[in-house]
Image: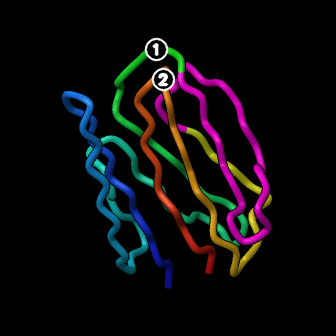
Amino acid sequence: MLLFFCTFISIEANTRTIEHIFFPSQSTEVDPALTVTQITAASISMSWSNFGANYKVTITDLTASRILTTFNSTNTNATVGGLISGHTYRCEVADGTPIINVDIVMG
């Protein structure tokens, strides 16, 4: 079973709203713009809405407190491997200021 932790951030007129939600799922739309799905014991696929042109994708291993990978993409999807079962990862996609992210516990 996967456990997703989502952070929704909304910035309007210098006001930031943050919501945290925990829920189990195999594949879940956790933000209107970002979906993360575990495809093997060590890999995930990510897809997001087209909200820009050049995206910075960052995967952080929260369990080990380190950035696993950061890369730029013009696509609206990516596959990331090399993940460790039992670790929690933060998947972030940014295009300038907007950042969308999802935390996933690999199972």
Q: Label 1 sits on what residue type?
A: Ala
**Where residue 107 appears, x then y in whole percent?**
62, 81
Which residue occupies the foreground of this view, 46 or 20? 20
Q: Residue at x 58, y 63 (%)?
A: 39
- Asked if labels 2 and 1 touch by Cβ distance under 8 angstroms, the answer is yes
Q: Label 2 sits on what residue type?
A: Asp
> In terms of sequence position, does the residue under pointer 1 or pointer 2 come before the other?
1
Q: Which residue is mark 1?
A: 53
Q: Residue at x 29, y 60 (%)?
A: 19
Q: Residue at x 60, y 36 (%)?
A: 57
Separation (CA) of disc 1 from disc 2: 7 Å
Left or right of 24: which side holds 62?
right
Asked which quadrant contains residue 33, the reply is top left
* 36 over 87 or under it: above or below: above
Q: Main secondary structure of the magenta part?
A: strand
Q: Is residue 58 magenta?
A: yes
Tell me where the magenta segment starts and ends, as one range.
55-77
Numbered tag placed on residue 95 in the rendering:
2
**Where residue 94 appears, x then y in whole percent?**
50, 31
| Residue ranking furthest to the left | 13
| Callout 2 secondary element | loop
| Residue ranking furthest to the top | 53
* 78 over 8 or under it: above or below: above
